[in-house]
Amino acid sequence: MTNPRRQRHGAPPRVAVLSLHTSPQDQPGTGDSGGMNVYVREVAERLAARGVEMDVFTRCAGRGVPTVDELGRGNRLIQVQAGPCAQVEKEHLERLLPAFLGGVLDRQRGDGATYDLVHSHYWLSGWVADGVKEIWGVPHVASFHTLGRVKNRSLARDEEPEPPVRLEGEQRVVAGADRILAPTPAEAAHLVGLYGADPERIRVVPGGVDHAVFLPRPREEARRRLHLTGVRLALFVGRLQPHKGPDIAIRALGEAVARDPARTADLVLAVVGGPSGRPTAGDEVSRLMDLAAALGVGDRVVFFPPQPQHRLADFYAAADAVLVPSRSESFGLVALEAQACGTPVIAADTGGLRYVVQDGVTGLLVPGHEPRDYADRLLRLLSDRVGVRRMSDAAVVHALRYSWDATAADVLDVYRELIGPRAHPVVRSPDAASLM
């Protein structure tokens, strides 16, 4: 089927973005929200400012009825009815995929809109995009953000493996997509090695960071704003699930305190994030609190709910070190944001973290997930003020290599490959751009 809009020369390109399981407006760090939410929002805003019309479709999950929100000129967030307008566990969303596809098609017909390209985020949206591609006759760009087979190779103890339906769904999306965006060469290699992806269809497009929000600021001032004066601060940011390793961060604190009570006398660990979306997810918070108490550091671990971006920047700036002990990371947005604020990162030597963190220069990479190894690095940073200052300066410079403007430009280049010259940017006027 030919998309009639593609025959209208001179019209700005129009893209349907599918983000089924989580909305770009959701707070990262809660439920199933994370770096993907930030990515979708930031890139859509910047592409719209360049003249690309962006309609982001997500599942209605909380307001009772589907809504259409104007996020700025050329940028809409469209909620689609698929199941109840309420939270549904990600594990159960697969049965709602046909309804979501039907909802997207109904909205398109009702608006009279036609699209030049569909860009899916995560495998669930990719399944829907396969249908959209066939019905609308448009190319499909897929972004996975995490890969089930990669995750299954690095599970935490007692962590449930990703189910076959996800692995099969990812395989289908890999086979059908016209382009696949990978944030790092590591994920590109996984797509080829684990899924048999055609290397000619893969483009490496790193994520970014908002340097107007995440930037160096005086540490003591940040601590005062957070009411954390008089302490040295280690920080964990992320969803409270075993795969992200908050328990490793707590155990590392316990190891460091036991090993060097004098050097850690004023050391506190702040844990910023919420549980994932399962009904028993609240148990994870209780489990982590019990773990801290059992290790004798219950009074040194402070839990905070997920934070808005400007407030999160204060946490990064207030910290002496940010711990990122994830079992796997496609990219590692937390590590990048922390470095942009001038805070060294102690991260797992895995996946995208190997590219985001320069070992010994902007932070320290840890092979494996033994808490004692994280404690070693934490004590090293606490005792080397000169080295930390050097690392902090290097981290800021390194983070400047990544920006959402650069990410959006790279994504636009991929769109151009598929839909031709009309994907060239038409920059909005300053007044219009300021609305984004």
Image: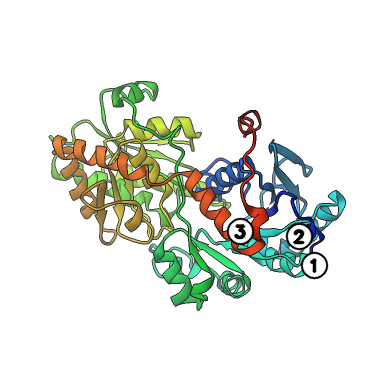
Depth check: give the residue in front, 213 or 334.
213
User: Camera-side residue: 275 or 216?
Assistant: 216
Of the two numbered discs 3 and 1 on the same chain, state the one appearing first in sequence: 1
- Amino acid under label 3? Arg
Q: What distance separates the C-alpha of mark 2 from that of mark 3? A: 13 Å
For the residues bearing labels 1 and 2, Cβ distance under 8 angstroms: yes
Mark 1 = which residue?
Answer: 2
**Image location of residue 136, percent across then percent down:** 77, 64
- Secondary element type, mark 1: loop
Residue at image position (43%, 48%) is: 333
Identify the residue shown where x is 50% and y is 50%.
407
* Position of residue 62 in the picture relative to residue 218 (left or right): right
Marks 3 and 1 sit apart, C-alpha to C-alpha, by: 18 Å
Task: Tell me which corner region of the image, top left, top right, bottom left or bottom right, holds residue 293.
Answer: top left
- Foreground of the two, 411 or 321: 411
For marks 1 and 2, give the CA distance.
8 Å
Task: Say which amino acid is labelled 1.
Answer: Thr
* Residue highlighted by disc 3: 416
Assess whether mark 1 and mark 3 are in contact (beta carbons under 8 angstroms).
no
Q: Helix or strand or loop: what does disc 3 sit on?
A: helix
Position of 8 with respect to 39 (left or right) is right
Q: Which residue is mark 2?
A: 6
**Residue located 61% across and 58% down the image:** 415
Q: Residues within 10 Å of mark 2 (few under 14, many from 20)?
A: many
Residue 165's x, y, as percent?
A: 60, 72
- Amino acid type at image mark 2: Arg
